[in-house]
Image: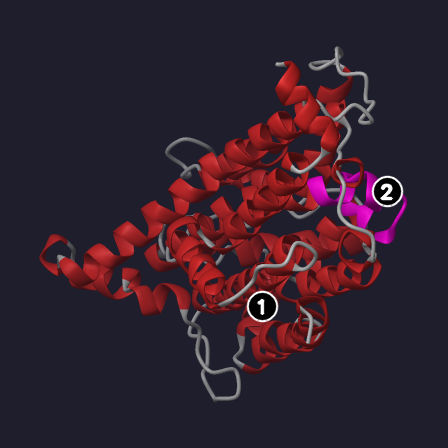
């Protein structure tokens, strides 16, 4: 059985697994009722709720989006307010991997071979990712990719012309991720009222929800203004690989250190527990950070913070697993060479770099192999 066929069997069921773990379990364990109760009162889920003013919810002046945004404010508040160490650590871990996620999604959607296909509508995908959950939308998106992208479905060998990306996008994407995702992420994580007011933090959380749109918007603006020397013509592949590798390295320069820092801190509570308070040891324990309760059990969330963390744990685990499987297909599906040693290599990369950064690194491996074997690239190297 080919890797492509195997991935088409493995990944699609996770759409339903994700829906059950995120939404049905979220309702059954009481997380969603707790969120709605806070949203109706416009009360933030914090231990210091008494004495806090109600948060404003007229963000757009239109009821449907305002209702959803106020629910998202309640959901994300305990993840970034600093009162829940375990939830904050998980958010930091996932947030770092999202940088690699944005690079993966944008680059693959911009490949010449994928132009004009449904997988190129990344802003819409990103908004659904935010509103429905990564654990549902990522398996669905990757399933569509596996059935529609010529990069994995075509019988023709991979060529640099198929993998090429508009050079303006390559130049603009780092700015897009920085201004569209990293800056809003930092803003909503600032402590209130020490550095920003409650209203400012609430607004920052709302603005952050649209980071897929902001990333694409700032990438476009950078492409048109900051990198005007790029012609946008990707037929010339001489500089493609070096530019692609720059994007890969910049994304991993954020994703990998956050992964390493998270697990260094978490494992330190096991190796050196005397350095931490008992409550911190419990909150940062590796199993408590990453493993949610059995969705088939009768676990009940005692607070919005606990329920939001369970939701995010399933989001992270499902997204991570399907992206690694997909990355293996992209890297080895057409180029071959996948075996037990390769599997161990992928597992090792996941441990060191993080799962989504590993998927990104597998794409880099694929690009390097394809461009290295290209007659045009070989000619360029000889002339250099």
What is the number of the mark on residue 115?
2
Mark 2 Cα shell of 10 Å, populated few (<14), some (14-19), many (≥20): some
Instruction: State the residue at coordinates (64%, 45%).
Output: 104
| Residue at the limit of the structure toward the left, as seen here | 274
Foreground residue, 153 or 111? 153
Residue positioned 62% across, 46% down in the render: 366
Relative depth, front residue between 162 and 123 = 162
Task: Describe residue 25's horizontal placement relative to residue 239 as left or right.
Answer: left
- Mark in front: 1 vs 2: 2
Is residue 49 visible in the rendered image? The answer is: no
Secondary structure found at label 1 = helix
Residues in magenta?
107-122
10 Å neighbourhood of mark 1: few (<14), some, or many (≥20)?
some
Considering depth in this image, is 44 or 98 the residue closer to the camera?
Answer: 98
Residue 76 in the image, given as x and y percentages of width and height: 53, 54
For image coordinates 63% across by 33% down, the residue present is 180
What secondary structure do most residues of the magenta stretch adopt?
Answer: helix
Residue 7 x/y as whole percent: 67, 70
Q: What percent of the width, then of the height, locates residue 217?
A: 74, 31
Q: In what quadrant of the picture does the C terminus appear?
A: top right
**In this view, which residue lies farthest toward the bottom?**
297
Q: In what element is the residue under mark 2?
A: loop
Q: Is residue 63 above or below residue 290?
A: above
Residue 102 falls in which quadrant of the image? top right
Q: Which residue is mark 1?
A: 37
Q: Is residue 20 magenta?
A: no
Q: Is residue 183 visible?
A: yes
Mark 1–mark 2 distance (CA, rounded to whole Å): 44 Å
174 and 281: which one is in front? 174
């Amino acid at each position: 059985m080919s890797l492509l066929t195997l991935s088409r069997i493995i990944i699609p069921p996770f759409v339903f697994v994700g829906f059950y773990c995120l939404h049905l379990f979220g309702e059954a364990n009481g997380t969603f009722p707790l969120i709605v109760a806070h949203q109706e009162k416009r009360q933030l889920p914090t231990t210091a709720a008494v004495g806090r003013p109600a948060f404003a919810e007229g963000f757009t002046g239109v009821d449907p989006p305002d209702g959803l945004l106020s629910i998202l404010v309640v959901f994300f508040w305990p993840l970034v307010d600093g009162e829940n160490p375990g939830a904050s650590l998980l958010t930091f871990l996932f947030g770092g991997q999202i940088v690699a996620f944005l690079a993966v999604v944008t680059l693959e959607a911009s490949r010449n071979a994928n132009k004009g296909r449904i997988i190129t509508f990344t802003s819409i995908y990103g908004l659904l990712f935010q509103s429905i959950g990564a654990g549902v939308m990522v398996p669905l998106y990757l399933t569509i990719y596996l059935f529609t992208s010529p990069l994995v479905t075509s019988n023709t060998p991979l060529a640099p012309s198929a993998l090429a990306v508009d050079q303006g996008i390559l130049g603009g994407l780092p700015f897009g991720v920085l201004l569209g995702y990293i800056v809003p992420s930092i803003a909503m994580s600032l402590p209130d009222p020490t550095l920003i007011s409650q209203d400012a933090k609430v607004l920052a959380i709302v603005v952050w929800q649209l980071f897929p749109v902001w990333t694409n918007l700032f990438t476009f603006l950078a492409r048109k203004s900051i990198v005007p020397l790029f012609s946008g013509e990707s037929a010339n592949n001489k500089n493609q690989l070096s530019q692609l590798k720059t994007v890969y390295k910049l994304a991993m320069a954020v994703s990998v250190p956050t992964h390493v820092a998270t697990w260094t801190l978490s494992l330190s509570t096991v190796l050196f527990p005397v350095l931490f308070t008992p409550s911190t040891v419990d909150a940062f324990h590796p199993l408590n950070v990453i493993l949610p309760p059995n969705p088939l059990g009768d676990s009940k969330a005692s607070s919005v913070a606990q329920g939001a963390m369970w939701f995010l744990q399933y989001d992270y685990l499902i997204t991570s697993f399907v992206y690694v499987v997909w990355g293996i297909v992209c890297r080895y599906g057409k180029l071959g060479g996948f075996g037990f040693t390769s599997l161990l290599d992928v597992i090792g990369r996941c441990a060191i770099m993080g799962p989504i950064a590993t998927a990104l690194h597998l794409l880099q491996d694929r690009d390097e192999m394809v461009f290295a074997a290209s007659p045009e690239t070989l000619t360029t190297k000889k002339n250099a």
